[in-house]
């Protein structure tokens, strides 16, 4: 029999995904759970396993196509339960398919087949008449005879188009109507050549060119058609559809910026002791083979500071009107990828040693840049760090990751003249930028947390006092 695999719900309410690539072709024999495609959700690239063992009969979508959840993407020829060879596909009027379970989610239940048909509006309405209702003969008693219904001749009533009856205006788009106003063209006199009689810009220009208007209007129409051609514009600009990770990120950032009242504070710190510690750790045996960077120490400082300032490891629950404080830390790390910004997080980062944290950071960023972060990696974060210093930037005002109370931006480490032991010395300096949600984090809480992070970087030995 023929079975269709519909694009599954990949979790977190995502409604669509883009087909990145097919790993199979028509005629290929596949086994259960064999990877058949890569799809990009709004958060990550996900591999789709096959829910059936059989032969691929059709690939319904091409790579690069954005597909809604629940739409069929591939068809299989599979054996039935009795082991018989496949037969023809079920007719269109067969019962609607059920959701087929698979490793990554479930296909959406289809409520109906086909698309609803819109009723076409007409410009002529018949005169109002009450249709006679005649009951079927078999429902009337035998001795009762239904009265004859004389047909009533109705004539359509034409109404002149005016401002009070906009449905009767000639069909056109707002830009076309503006062009007609600029050129002094009465759209009532213009015949539309577009779909369904739609009046296009060319129809208006051709009407003007017919000589029915003054020379000034015809000259204006000629100027309006003068701009560079579409092909010339394409050569001067590049248009990229907004989809996938970038589309999700844009929506999330707009929602965050206009929902949570952001406050950003800055602290410039002499991190020379932290950089000296980092150099010693790289040479030590426990860290052999591990990638240690300033981000490693900043992440550890954030985790230690949260013990003294747990209010920043929280979220605002609007639906229940509650502040939810987490007793664990899922540390998000903003990562720039070819597909856009993602923020995967390290689960239970507060339980990791510095060695384990360095390994987790390296694995997380490598996976994110390769576009292989799973939806689980990208959800459930409680607080985030963004490293803008790698781009040579000193400070910024980071936007909160939705559902989190704070985000810390670490700037570049620069050698700067700095006061040290009552003298001016060349020291390694970093600026920290902390944005937090002022609905649940007071200025005092945010300031104390930022000061604690700075103190740990300025003197790593403070970790003993804060532990």
Image (cartoon, grey):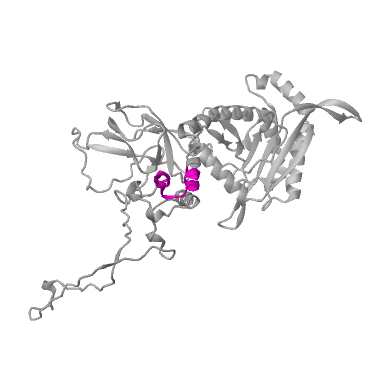
Q: Position of residue 102 (x, y in %)?
A: 37, 38
In this rendered view, identify the residue nearer to me: 76 or 166.
Answer: 166
In the depicted structure, whether residue 165 falls above or below residue 449? below
Q: Position of residue 328 (x, y in %)?
A: 61, 42
Q: Residue furthest left?
A: 143
In the depicted structure, whether residue 420 falls above or below residue 309? above
Q: How many marks?
A: 0
Q: Position of residue 168 (x, y in %)?
A: 37, 60
| Quarter of the image where the N terminus is located | top left
Q: Which residue corresponds to the image point at 69% horizontal and 43% vertical from the top-left?
A: 435
Q: Which residue corresponds to the image point at 73% horizontal and 21% vertical from the top-left?
A: 279
Magenta-colored span: 200-221
Q: Is 374 positioned to the left or the right of 90 in the image?
A: right
In this rendered view, identify the residue nearer to me: 77 or 282.
Answer: 77
Q: Residue furthest bottom?
A: 143
Report if residue 465 is visible in the image: no
| Quarter of the image where the C terminus is located | top right
Q: Position of residue 431 (x, y in %)?
A: 75, 34
Q: Is 173 positioned to the left or the right of 251 in the image?
A: left
Report if residue 137 is visible in the image: yes
Q: Residue furthest right?
A: 422
Residue 365 belongs to magenta span: no
Q: Is 164 positioned to the left or the right of 71 in the image?
A: right
Residue 206 belongs to magenta span: yes
Q: Main secondary structure of the magenta part?
A: helix
In this rendered view, identify the residue nearer to me: 312 or 289.
Answer: 312
Q: Which residue corresponds to the image point at 73% horizontal and 36% vertical from the top-left?
A: 432
In the depicted structure, whether residue 108 falls above or below residue 417? below
């Amino acid at each position: 029999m023929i079975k269709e695999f519909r694009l599954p719900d990949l979790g977190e309410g995502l409604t669509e995904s883009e087909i990145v690539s097919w790993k199979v072709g028509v005629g290929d024999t596949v086994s259960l759970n064999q990877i058949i495609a890569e799809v990009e959700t709004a958060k990550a690239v996900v591999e789709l396993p096959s829910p059936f063992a059989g032969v691929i009969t059709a690939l319904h979508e091409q790579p690069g196509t954005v597909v809604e959840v629940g739409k069929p993407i591939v068809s299989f020829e599979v054996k039935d339960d009795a082991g018989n060879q496949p037969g023809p596909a079920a007719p269109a009027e067969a019962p609607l398919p059920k959701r087929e379970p698979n490793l990554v989610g479930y296909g959406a239940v289809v409520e109906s087949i086909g698309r609803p048909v819109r009723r076409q509006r007409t410009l002529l309405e018949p005169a109002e008449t009450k249709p006679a209702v005649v009951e079927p003969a078999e429902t009337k008693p035998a001795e009762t005879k239904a009265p004859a219904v004389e047909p009533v001749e109705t004539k359509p009533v034409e109404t002149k188009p005016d401002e009070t009856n906009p449905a009767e205006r000639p069909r056109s788009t707002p830009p076309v109507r503006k062009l007609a106003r600029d050129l002094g063209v009465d759209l009532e006199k213009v015949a539309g050549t577009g779909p369904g009689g739609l009046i296009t810009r060319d129809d208006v220009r051709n009407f003007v060119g017919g000589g029915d208007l003054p020379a000034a209007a015809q000259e204006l129409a000629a100027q309006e058609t003068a701009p560079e051609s579409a092909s010339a514009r394409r050569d001067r600009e590049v248009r990229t559809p907004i989809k996938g990770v970038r589309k999700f990120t844009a929506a999330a950032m707009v929602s965050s910026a206009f929902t949570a009242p952001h406050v950003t504070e800055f602290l410039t710190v002499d991190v020379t002791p932290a950089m000296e510690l980092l150099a010693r750790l790289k040479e030590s045996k426990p860290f052999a083979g591990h990638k240690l960077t300033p981000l490693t120490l900043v992440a550890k400082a954030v985790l230690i500071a949260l013990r003294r300032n747990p209010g920043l490891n929280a979220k605002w629950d609007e639906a229940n009107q509650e502040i939810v404080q987490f007793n664990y830390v899922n540390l998000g790390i903003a990562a720039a990828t070819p597909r856009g910004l993602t923020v995967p997080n390290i689960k239970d980062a507060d339980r990791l040693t510095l060695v384990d944290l360095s390994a987790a950071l390296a694995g997380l960023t490598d996976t994110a840049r390769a576009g292989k972060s799973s939806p689980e990696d990208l959800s459930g974060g409680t607080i985030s760090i963004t490293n803008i210093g790698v781009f040579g930037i000193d400070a910024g005002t980071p936007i909160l990751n939705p559902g989190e109370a704070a985000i810390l931006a670490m700037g570049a480490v620069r050698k700067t003249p700095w006061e040290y032991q009552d003298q001016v010395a060349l020291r390694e300096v970093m600026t920290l930028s902390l944005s937090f949600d002022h609905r649940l984090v007071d200025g005092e809480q945010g300031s104390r947390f930022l000061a604690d992070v700075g103190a740990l970087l300025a003197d790593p030995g403070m970790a003993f006092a804060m532990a």
